[in-house]
Image (spheres, coloured by chain):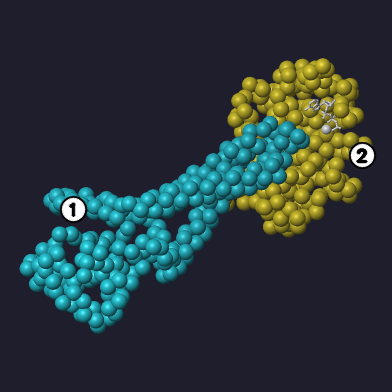
Amino acid sequence: MNWEKFNPLMFLMALGAGGISVIPFAIFQYTTEHGKGLVTLSQMGTDSLAFISEKEMESVLGIDNKASLILVKLSTIGTEDKFRKDFAELGISEDMKTWQEKIGGIIGTIAGTFNLLTMITTLVSLIIAAVIILVIIYINTVNKRKQIGILKAIGIDQEVIIFSYIFQALFYCIAGIFFGLLLIWGLTNIFTQNPIPFPMGEVSPIITFPLLAKSSISLLLISLIGGFLPSWQTARQSILDSIWG
Amino acid sequence: MIEIKNLKKIYDMGAIKVKALNDISINIEKGEFVALMGASGSGKSTFLHQVGLLDSPTSGDIIIDNINVLDLSEKEKTLFRLNKLGYVFQEYAILEELTALENVYLPVLMMGKSKQECIAAAKEVLEKVGLGDRMDHFQKELSGGQQQRVAIARALVNKPKILFADEATANLDTKSSIQILELFRELNKKYGQTIIMVTHENFHKKYVDRIIYLKDGKVIKNME
Ligand SMILES: Nc1ncnc2c1ncn2[C@@H]1O[C@H](COP(=O)(O)OP(=O)(O)OP(=O)(O)O)[C@@H](O)[C@H]1O
Ligand SMILES: [Mg+2]
């Protein structure tokens, strides 16, 4: 057998569960193994590996409780850097890589593409939201031009009038944030239960709090501007222009 | 109470200058009910806008309650209108999203009063204009005459020194117009409310104390 061309996956597939295989360790050592089953994670890197138990490995390699690599699974994704810092503070000076750095290459590029897509869609939705809020408040103020003029005439302060429209815009904004969060929650749930298969593994969306906070605050700011601009534009007109113009 | 000296309002239309008010000087006393009459384009509305601080004249003085109101800043003018002046326009222009009561208590709220005080003041004046049983109605649930009475109540709620009305009954039928005129007269007689009213209708003359006739921006007749 040509060990250099050895592909454990093809080998195990050909063998099937229960068959006997010879797995090469460190080129010179051999062990005889029973194929226990096939691992399918639809993840390229994993599916083409053969797995053996820790006990088996230690007996073959003659080592005990040693590892060349430790994988740490975090309960929340997106906190990699914080943990790296924490580990460093605990005095661990070994080389530490986040999953993005470790995987690198094509997956890193794909992850980057996803991030870029997220940024673009966020930006586009924010622009759409801004325009919609601007248009709604603009139409409202134009329709109420005469009323705004009369309110100013009877002594209602211009700022109070502008504030009432900003308040209206904020109402739309908060409703938008609420429904947006609901939608995100629903979609994340669906895609977590039914991840999208990709060659390098299954992909499901992850929403982090900083992302949500950033989007919500941006929407809030945009609504403030969207409420202020048109109402200010209408409210600053002279009273007579508003009433009769 | 109102002293108007050499009031001029000239609209500069480029080639021509329209002298909408051409040197008007008159006094109006506290408690007077005055009608402004004259042909269309004679300057009645323009006069009311200047005296009511809705616009700024080209020259002249307007002294209300010993204050030269033309010296006030825009913000001070807004406050002056809120505190001392009341307006009724041809369009009733009450807010459709609010009930009659809420429409009337809005100007009181702007004065920084508590909600109870606002409601009490608004109720009192709505009773006065005969809408005690329509307080919770919205605009669309009120007749034209009733809407105009809400607007009058809103104009009166802060107890203004002067009530201005520019063709306040022009959109109403004769019966509703008479009700409004009688309300004005009652407010004037019973509470001493000063009222300056623009009108075209000859039958309105019998309700007022004094009529000022305008023609081409000048006072041509001033009769008690
Ligand atoms: N914004 C304006 N720009 C230019 N000219 C104006 C303006 N407003 C009014 N005028 C002119 O000033 C004059 C007086 O107008 P005003 O509206 O005071 O008349 P009025 O007596 O109220 O008339 P009506 O009975 O029709 O309401 C008119 O000749 C009018 O064309
Ligand atoms: Mg007029």
Ligand 2 quadrant assignment: top right
Shown in yellow, the chain is B
Q: Residue furthest front?
A: A1
Q: Residue B191, image x and y in percent?
A: 73, 41
Q: Residue B88, image x and y in percent?
A: 76, 40
Residue at 18 percent of width and 71 percent of height: A23
Residue at 43 percent of width and 65 percent of height: A196
- For badge 2, the amino acid type reads Phe
- Image colour assigned to chain A: cyan
Q: Nearer the viewer, residue A245 or B138?
A: A245
Q: Which residue is mark 2?
A: B203
Q: From the viewer's perspective, is the residue at label 1 or at label 2 nearer?
A: 1
Q: Quadrant of residue A71?
A: bottom left
Q: Which residue is mark 1?
A: A87
Marks 1, 2 in one chain: no
Instruction: Tell me if mark 2 has few (under 14), some (14-19) or many (20+) residues whose alpha carbon lies within 10 angstroms of its own.
Output: few
Residue at 34 percent of width and 65 percent of height: A43
Residue at 79 percent of width and 18 percent of height: B14
Q: Quadrant of the C terminus of chain B?
A: top right
Asked whether, in this view, residue B194 is left or right of residue B83, the answer is right
**What is the chain identity of the residue bearing mark 2?**
B
Q: Helix, strand or loop at disc 1?
A: helix
